[in-house]
Amino acid sequence: MGQKQNHRTNSEDSKGMALQIKMFDLMTLLGNLSILIILLTIISPKANCRYALAESHSVANADAIAIKANHQTRAADADGVFGYTLIEYLKDLQHLHNYDNVLVMHNKNSTIASIFYSVINSSSNSITANANTSSHVDDGDGDGDAAGANITFIDQILSGIVKGPTPRWPSTPSLPFVGHFMHHVQVPVVQLNEWQHFKLKDQMTDNLLAIVQIDINRGGIQITLDQHMGLLKKLSLNLWHMKMAKVFFLMNAPLMTNGQMAPEYDDLAQGIVEQLFQDCWSKKLLYCAAIMADYQTTRTIYRFTPFPIFTLETITMAVNGERQEELFPERLQDLLGFKMRIVIGGSDPRIIAYDVNGKQFVGGFVGHFIWAFAKKFNCTIVEPLPFNPKSPLPSQELVKAVQNGTVEWSAGITFPAIPFKGGSYPYEMINWCIMIPVEADIPGYKFFTSVFKGESYMLFVGSLVLLSMALSFAMYIHGHSVDILDIICHDNCLRGILGQSFIELPKAPKIVRAIYLEICVLGILLTTAYNAYFSTYVTQAPKSATLNNLDDILASGLKSIAWRPEFNEVFGRLADRQKYSRMFILEDSYQKYLQLRESFNTDYGYVVPTTKWTIINEQQKIFTTPLFRQSSSFCFINNIPMGFPVHENSPFMDTLYQLILEISESGLTNMWMEHGFMELIKAKKLQLEDLSKKKEFHAMKVEDLMYIFIFLAMMLVIVLVVFALELVVYYHGERLRKLTNGFRKNKQKFVDG
């Protein structure tokens, strides 16, 4: 049924075309018909054709099926030309790879050759536009098929398919490649030349196909690849960061009568293709393919693989229902033993080198990541700059090796660049903090003043005053004389509270005896509490003034050691923390900085990342007393994303991203971090010994009684002063009284006078 419908529709179209030709002949003979009649003559068949196509949806579907069947069963002619244009292949490729956008590039003074969207006529080496289906020549019986039921008459005129007298209006050239492509494949197209480039990543996805024409001959002059470097450079810039974009090169050269390229151009094209692919790989373009101008005869497509070594590959265009081999196969999941050039650097616990069965093994949570990458993607790790565990290079210095192309990526994780570029997805999140020595014990002579502080003294004085007032009032109401000073500080109360004996009143009233008893009980409680606190301080002395934040550290004068490049990297981003820069001692040598940090010298503080502090904290658990401590208030920046330096246009960016997420999700990163402590012991970089100072018993020294001696000296001075005043009063009392009376008389006379 479908074949009958197809035959009926094709017959109707052929009749319409014949009628149209006769109308053109009539216009030629008359010559004076108006422009309106010409336009109506053109438009009417077009409208009839469209009406015929829209007449029945089922008929249109049958036509499409017939066209597809015709396309699949097309065979090569006697000279080996199989009539399958690039437009048709790209349409099939769109179904295979489903690209969303197309970039067309060629030199400014050239256009895409018609051979790439037209069919070769093998008998005369002429070009006939294919229009996405095979052309069919009318055999004279009026039943010849049209070029395609879905192609309008105007399209057929422009494509040069219609046979017959040429209409007498200005001739229209064949539709350019972009026009044919957009008409049949129907995807957005961007057309640029060697003078133009844009950052297409900001506007399009990576699912893009770039079609680039490379002219091998122009005006009879052979052209080398060097003359296309401008075009290739702009291609690389246009596809910057579009790692999964595909590139399809069209190698244009004149064809001979048999539809093949001349031998001199064929050899030239082969060499240029290999050079072209090598240049593409140097520009980080992985998915590239190319065809020659004689592709309709050879059916050959060129592509390359850099894994494990650079190799030029060829595949065949599929026709006659053959299964088309995938043009751009996935290559990054299996690198086939490719020699992956990386550089290793940084310090423990990220990189830990130790011997396993006589061979050096690089461990640490970064070292394990390297071997996981090699195992998962089947590649061989190669180090152009061998890692030296005795003098490791800092990760910041390894970035240059990535930028100049010495290595593909660096295994030394480092700070991200701002703006973010040239780095992988974060592998480690750190806080940039300092660890400070644990505060020293207070000296022994401060024990006496440290027992009672502030509120304790106020409680003691308040209790003394209240008891003195109560005792004085009780003695007064029972007829005993009371001195005014006793109301504030009674001698019996002071002695009793201090645990000393005092003289009681003979036959004291009951209320006075009750107050005496209360004084004794309070004295016992206070002296017992004091002795308990004092004994505790002697056995476990409190620390000196605690440093709680960065301002306290700055005020204390404690210096912290930092590596200068890392310090500059961090403080260059901290405009509000510049005042703390004077608390650092900067070390230029990375190896010396690591040695100072590992020395546990408590005279300084040190900058340590989060993962390093975890190791130090575990090591201090075997110490009698910890030597260093760290707090969140000692951090300058929190949650810094640390990643691997990678070339910003590297095709391995996505593989790193994939592996980082998989390892993090599986918990391997945390496990490797936890095992770093044991790996450091294997590497003999961490000794299980107590580095803290052991506490030994020693008797109290004279220095420990310094405050007692100072207090006694003050009391002695007061006693001597009072004693001196008493002597003066005793020996010179009469003279002082006469002198005082004389002053009084003179004052009275002055008042009376």
Image (cartoon, grey):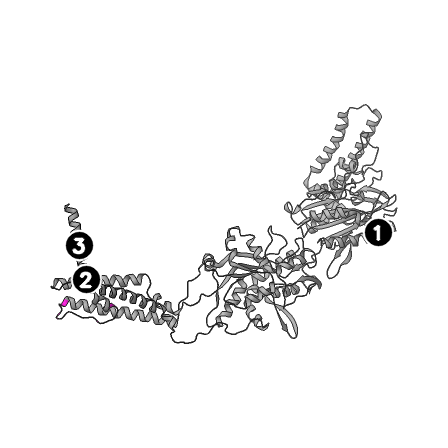
Q: Which mark is residue 742?
A: 3
Give x and y (percent) for residue 529. 30, 69
Q: Give the residue pinned by disc 2.
A: 733
Q: Is residue 268 above or below residue 154?
A: below
| Residue 215 x/y as whole percent | 80, 46
Between marks 1 and 2, how big is the CA–CA gap? 133 Å
For the record, the magenta segment spans: 496-510
336 to 107, vertically: above or below = below
Q: Most prominent secondary structure in the magenta stretch?
A: loop
Q: Label 1 sits on what residue type?
A: Leu
Can you tell which quarter of the image residue 166 is in?
top right
Give the farthest residue toward the left: 479
Q: Earlier in the sequence, mark 2 or mark 3?
A: 2
Q: Along the horizontal axis of the image, is 184 left or right of 576?
A: right
Distance between mark 2 and mark 3 Cα atoms: 14 Å
Q: Is residue 497 found inside the magenta-colored segment of the image?
A: yes
| Rendered view: 716 above or below 23 | below
Residue position for label 1: 268
At 17% from the left and 51% from the top, the residue drawn is: 746
Q: Badge 1: how crowded within 10 Å, few (<14), some, or many (20+)? A: some
Alpha-carbon neighbours of circle 3 within 10 Å: few (<14), some, or many (≥20)?
few
Q: Would residue 91 be seen by someone viewing this image from the given angle?
A: no
In the image, taking residue 384 as reference, residue 688 lies left or right, namely left
- For label 2, the SS is helix
Amino acid type at image mark 3: Gly
Tag of residue 354: none
Placement of 516 over or under 89, stated as above or below: below
> What is the distance, in whole Å, between disc 1 and disc 3 at their CAs?
136 Å
Is label 1 in contact with label 3 (beta carbons under 8 Å)? no
Q: How many marks?
A: 3
**At 71% from the left edge and 62% from the top edge, which residue is drawn?**
338
Q: Is residue 7 magenta?
A: no
